[in-house]
Amino acid sequence: MTTNDSETVVRFENVGLRYGLGPEVLQDVTFSLAAGSFHFLVGDSGAGKSSLLKLIYLALKPSRGLISLFGRDIATTPRRELPAMRRRVGVVFQEFRLLNHLSAFDNVALPLRVAGVRKSDIQKHVVELLSWVGLKDHLDARPPTLSGGQQQRISIARAVISRPKLLLADEPTGNVDDRMAMRLLHLFEELNKLGTTVIIATHNSHLVKKLKFPKMHLDEGWMEIVGADTERASVPPTSEPGPGGGLFDDGDDDGTRPDLEKLF
Amino acid sequence: MFARRSDLLLDKDALSRFLPWLIAFMVFLAILAMAGMLVLNATASRWDQGIRGTLTVQVMPAEDPAKDDERLQVVLSVLAQMPEIDRYEMLTDDRLLKLLEPWLGPAAGSRDLPLPRLVDVELKTGADLNAEVLSRQLAARVPGTSVDDHRIWLKRLVRLIQTVEGLATLVLAFIALATVGTVVFTTRTGLDIHREAIEVMHLIGAQDSYVAGQFASRAFALGLKGGVFGLLLAVPTLLGIGYLAQQMDSSLLPDITLGPVHWSALAGLPLVVSLIAMVTARITVMKTLSRML
């Protein structure tokens, strides 16, 4: 895939990563992702998917090579400017990483708070988004009191609340059945249509085959992008919308696809 | 109390419960040290003002007691001609005996004891009178007369007060250092306890100052809480010491009561300690987080 720097959201050049003195878990990874693209990140367990995502969301430094994000070389970007870059990246962590002492509302509000958004705006957006993901009745609930699926929805809401330019999701469908997984993908696809670049790391080969988005395939630390030239498929509507026809079982929206323009 | 909302669970830390107590004890000690310093300072100032501008002329008793009055009159006439002198007053025998009583006991009342005559001299404000010159002048007219301008006494007093004040300042400095050390330790422990939450905040784009602000705000609140408690402990202690000192009714003890200005300074100490805690916590967090990516 060749793109201009101005349109490139993520660029890796000969990136290698090793933990301590161990073997390289990523070797000579080179790719670039255009703004508004949608990719699955696939590979066997231990292939380095999570490590690759960590490099993109700036949780790790590469052992070698060059990474640029939104056209800026990470190695030469002053540390004080990294938080602003991170705010443009939404992350759905594999293990959710919700703050258990905070309510669902406060967890989702966190990215807005750290960005200095006004309290009244936070209140409005967070309540709307949590209502939309079917957690209107759980605004004050602490994550440990919620099911895995509900926690996952909070995690996704937290990742998308600030309308990120880049969305990274590590096994976002790992805790839900295929039907729910498909519904979650609607959300990511709608965000993608609004211009967000999306990377989803998944083991769910069923979804990957069905949706025909390009795949970033990792195998023992080496990566190749396959299917980039394939015509992009749209996520098919779910056959069984939940009560009220919402994206989630207890959602309030009228269709299977969220209207994100209204939501944000 | 006092803290703004926090994204971190700082309230529930065991260390958060422990810090106010430590600060309370430190503030208690700091207030005692500072009160001592203020009292000494005020006392020294009072003594200094009282002594400066005064002289004591001592006329030794003559071999022939009948000449004592005559000698004294000569001295008084010399003093009366000095333009620098505002007023002078001869100490009566009764007053002299009363002053001697604490040292000599009832024997001081014996009229057989040869006592010098003392004249208390008060100089005009800003007057520059050389005590040595006056002493020589008087001794020439009345042998055995001397002038004491209290300089030696004043010098020793000032040296003593300065030493004690220096010690009190040292105590305050140690207390400030101990507060800083305690806050650094509790903040670092807090950072370890909340590492996971801080990492998440960091990854969603929180500036170091955002996280540091939460720790600083908490440290300020805990510092103020502990400080106010320390002040509440110190006030009755100081009042108790003041009461005991008054009960002693001794002319040897200076007046050790604190004025409104002193009380205000002491009441401000908890705020100073909380500000130290706040700044220390902020610097500690900023320094620790700067090592993260």
Image (spheres, rainbow, N blue to C red):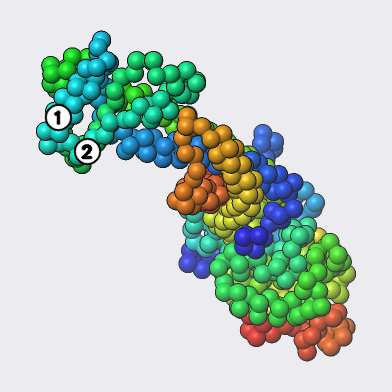
- Whole-percent x, y for residue B218 in the image: 62, 54
Residue at the image position 65 percent from the left and 80 percent from the top:
A124
Residue A230 vs residue B74, the one in the foreground = B74
Whether callout 1 and callout 2 share a subunit is answered yes
Question: Alpha carbon of mark 1 to alpha carbon of mark 2: how far?
Answer: 12 Å
Chain identity of mark 1: B
Task: Give the structural element (helix, strand or loop) at label 2.
Answer: strand
- Amino acid found under the numbered disc labelled 2: Arg
Residue A167 vs residue A86, the one in the foreground = A86
How many other residues sit within 10 Å of disc 2, few (<14), some (14-19) or many (≥20)?
few
Displayed quadrant of residue B78: top left
State the residue position of label 1.
B77
Chain identity of mark 2: B
Q: Which mark is residue B87?
A: 2
Displayed quadrant of residue B140: top left
- On the picture, is B34 further left or further right than B131? right
Residue B193 vs residue A18, the one in the foreground = B193
- On the picture, is B28 further left or further right than B143? right
Question: Eyeballing the image, is B166 above or below B11?
Answer: above
- Whole-percent x, y for residue B52 in the image: 28, 34
Residue A207 vs residue B37, the one in the foreground = B37
Residue at the image position 41 percent from the left and 25 percent from the top:
B97
- Amino acid found under the numbered disc labelled 1: Ser
